[in-house]
Image: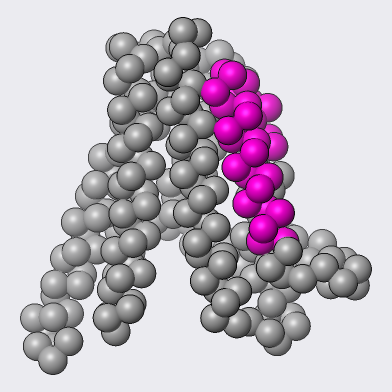
Amino acid sequence: MLERFRQFWTNIWAPLGDLFLRLGITPNQVTVVGTLGVSGGALFFFPRGQFFVGVMVVTAFVFSDLIDGYMARKLGKASKWGAFLDSTLDRVGDAAVFGGIMLYYTTSDAEADLGDPRMYLYLSLACLVLGNLTSYARARAESLGMTAKGGIAERSDRLVAILVMTGFAGLLDLPFLREITLWALAIASLITVFQRMRIVYNQTVDDPAL
């Protein structure tokens, strides 16, 4: 759903990408630094319960995912290695976000408005695993010459939802906002896995040669 806004945000950050190019910074360097920033922010602040600050730090780096792609296209040097690096490190950043939340629920200070904090440890783990599984399903389908893009919870939807609601939960001291989001994303991610499996299945039925 949020993929339609990608070009808008790319245009917003294009001047920064142009500046990086003038400074001799490469797209792959932006990819690596962005992943380090997202992972470091999530794994440092979230386990301490500093969710609003953590979301601000993560958000500052998460737009690198748009900037590096813009820079590669501007240089005319979009490469398979760059695409592979970007896709792989995206999974690292996503795992760090949900892993940081999961680590918070292992601490004695963890609070939950809607049930036992341990429940949200498991839900965070489910979001982490299912989120990576949706990405794997698409990648595996493409490696077999098929497509598996789509579903109700694509990567950008999941990332925006958890960051926005986790940020508000920390700012307003309303943990239930984060908890509801974890429930929603766990369910939506599971549905998305089955949707992508169905997409691939339909392609094999329509073309037995696949």
Residue drawn at (42%, 18%), measured in percent from left and top? 106
Q: Quadrant of residue 193?
A: bottom left
Residue drawn at (91%, 68%), measured in percent from left and top? 23
**Residue 191 rendering spot, x and y as whole percentages:** 22, 50
Residue drawn at (35%, 23%), measured in percent from left and top? 120
Give the residue furthest to the top. 108
Left or right of residue 188, residue 210 in this image: left
Membership of 33 in magenta stretch: yes
Q: Which residues are magenta?
A: 30-57
Give the residue furthest to the bottom. 209
Residue drawn at (8%, 81%), measured in percent from left and top? 205
Q: How is the image coloured?
A: one colour
**Residue 119 rendering spot, x and y as whole percentages:** 30, 20
**Residue 101 rendering spot, x and y as whole percentages:** 48, 28
**Whether residue 78 is visible:** yes
Membership of 177 in magenta stretch: no
Left or right of residue 207, residue 46 in this image: right
Residue 110 against residue 62 in the figure, above or below: above
Q: Quadrant of residue 139?
A: bottom left
Q: From the image, give the main secondary structure of the stretch colored magenta.
A: helix
Number of marks in picture: 0
Residue 49 against residue 128 in the figure, above or below: above
**Residue 209 rendering spot, x and y as whole percentages:** 13, 91
Q: The N terminus appears in which quarter of the rendering?
A: bottom left
Q: The C terminus appears in which quarter of the rendering?
A: bottom left
Left or right of residue 72, residue 150 in this image: left
**Whether residue 67 is visible:** no
Residue 47 against residue 10 in the figure, above or below: above
